[in-house]
Image (cartoon, rainbow, N blue to C red):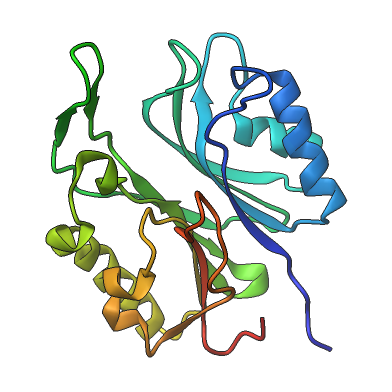
Amino acid sequence: MEKIIKIATWNIGQDLENKEINKNSYEYIRKQIQENNIDIIAFQESITESNNLQSLASYISENTKLKYCEEISLSPSDMNKDDKMGVSICSKFKINSNEKYILENPKLVYKKTSTITYWSHDKGFNISQIEEIDVVIIEGHCLPFHIFGENPLKYRNIYSKLEDKILKIIELNKNVILLGDFNYTNIFELFPNLKEKMKCVYENQKTRKDKQIDYILTTNRYKT
């Protein structure tokens, strides 16, 4: 009998209703996980360090069936003053090993106004092996080059290093699921050598501002 696993990716971003990420935000996220019966979820821009909140991953671990989690603190939160945010994975299945992979930061600066300046923050991925379902989950967040007026393809070397890592995992006869916020509308332009190895679970979906920048990819043996 085939095993059905429900996997999701979610850039938390901003809670416009509460004007900050808080306990109400967490409760909403928890309810969505339970109502949709999610087995594995990847978060981007999740709170990882705070004086007022526990990390999102630990909250989900304590309050849902997704008891196993990993997270990476990457940058200051743009929503909660003094908090840090990053990427995290929460899973119903035991995470047997996890590697934290940080993308190269090109240290971009964009002065939007006389009082607003953007700096490129670190972005990264969790690479989690889950033996129970024989899969490696690679989840994370890529740089928003569009904010700096840059084309991500100019920085293909950053993506090539991660792509090489993914290909090596696949070569070891591993089943791989790649998911997250890639901040670009054509994932196979970022990772062209994955096109023959992986497929998109969904395409032409508007995940932000009428564009698709979030993806879930699987190696070809999976039915989606």
Residue at screen point 47% across, 80% down: 174
Q: Residue at x 45, y 11 (%)?
A: 81
User: Does residue 60 appear in the picture of this structure?
Assistant: yes
Q: Is residue 46 left or right of residue 157?
A: right
Q: Is residue 32 above or below residue 211?
A: above
**Residue at 77% from the left image edge and 38% from the top image edge:** 30
In this orientation, which residue lies closer to the viewer: 94 or 85?
Answer: 85
Is residue 3 left or right of 201 when viewed as pictured? Answer: right
Residue 109, compared with residue 7, is above or below; it is: above
- Residue in view at x 66 percent, y 86 percent: 223
* Residue 40 horizontal/vertical position (percent): 67, 57
Residue 99 visible to the viewer: no
Residue toward you, 162 or 106: 106
Q: As rendered, which of 166 and 15 lies closer to the eye?
A: 15
> Residue 168, percent across and down?
31, 77
Residue 125 location, x and y as percent?
39, 51
The image quarter in which residue 54 lies: top right
Q: Is residue 159 left or right of residue 15?
A: left
Q: Does 115 appear above or below 195?
A: above
> With 132 as the anchor, is 155 left or right in this view?
left
User: For the C terminus, which image quadrant?
Assistant: bottom right
Query: Which one is in front, 184 or 9?
Result: 184
Disc tally is 0
Q: Is residue 223 above or below residue 122?
A: below
Expressed as whole percent of the image width and height from the top left, the position of residue 84 reads: 43, 23
The quadrant the N terminus occupies is: bottom right
